[in-house]
Amino acid sequence: MDMERRFLGRGISAGEAGYYMAAALEQAQFAARNDEVPVGALWTNLRGGVVACRNGIRSSHDPTAHAELLCVREASQLLGNERIGGILFTTLEPCPMCMGALLLARVDVVIFAASDPKSGACQSVLSLCSHPSLNHRIDIIQGVCEKESAELLRTFFQKKRRERKYLE
Ligand SMILES: [Zn+2]
């Protein structure tokens, strides 16, 4: 099935998805400039509610300050409701903690850019979105702006390795 038709079933076009993911990538670039692993996320309910966050683990000394989790928290506050529904865009496949939060928040769709072979919980390491015994399921779409996100992560870690080499 082509990309456009897949998206239309979820109330969003491929063009709109690219637009929202570009905003999530901008968040990831902000994170990199703050010496954080470049991951950004954006949540929208397509009815005017929009929240965008970036990874802030190091700057907030908080191992749970992942972009997706911060989006869930902010969106819940924005709506005054712990069930936020909607679509979560993220530049990297969510980890198990974030998938747990997205399930609890009853998010309908997760759209991610790059896969995470080390801790991805949509499909790469675990598949938490469609476990048969869970009473909520999340639709997953992968690969929107995949190259851009992977490149951003690669550049960041290359720079880190160079810096480490220089210090040794
Ligand atoms: Zn996470």
Image (tube, rainbow, N blue to C red):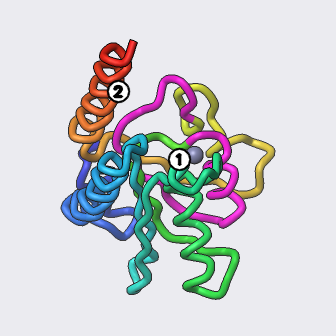
Binning the other alpha carbons within 10 Å of mark 1 as few (below 14), some (14 to 19) or many (20 upward) gives few
SS at mark 1? helix
Ligand 1 near label 2 (Cβ, under 8 Å)? no
Residue 9 lies, with reference to residue 34, above or below; the image says: below
Q: Quadrant of the N terminus?
A: top left
Give the class, few, some or many, for how many residues have Cα within 10 Å of label 2's Cα (few <14, many ≥20): few
Could you say where residue 12 lies in the image, as x and y percent from the top left?
Answer: 32, 67
| x and y percentages locating residue 70 in the rendered image | 56, 63
- Taking depth in this image into account, of 77 and 108 the one nearest to the observer is 77
Percent x, y of residue 151:
23, 33
Q: Residue at x 34, y 13 (%)?
A: 165
Q: Residue at x 26, y 48 (%)?
A: 3
Whether pointer 1 and pointer 2 mark residues with C-beta atoms closer than 8 Å, the reply is no
Which residue is painted at 56% across and 74% down in the image?
74
- Which comes sooner in the sequence, label 1 or label 2? 1
The image quadrant of residue 122 is top right
Name the kind of residue labelled 2 in the image: Lys
Which residue was labeled with disc 2?
A: 160
Q: Magenta stretch: residue 158 in it?
A: no
The tag on residue 58 is 1
Residue range in magenta is 95-120
Q: Is residue 63 left or right of residue 15?
A: right
Picture quarter with the C terminus:
top left
Looking at this view, name the residue that lies furthest to the front: 167
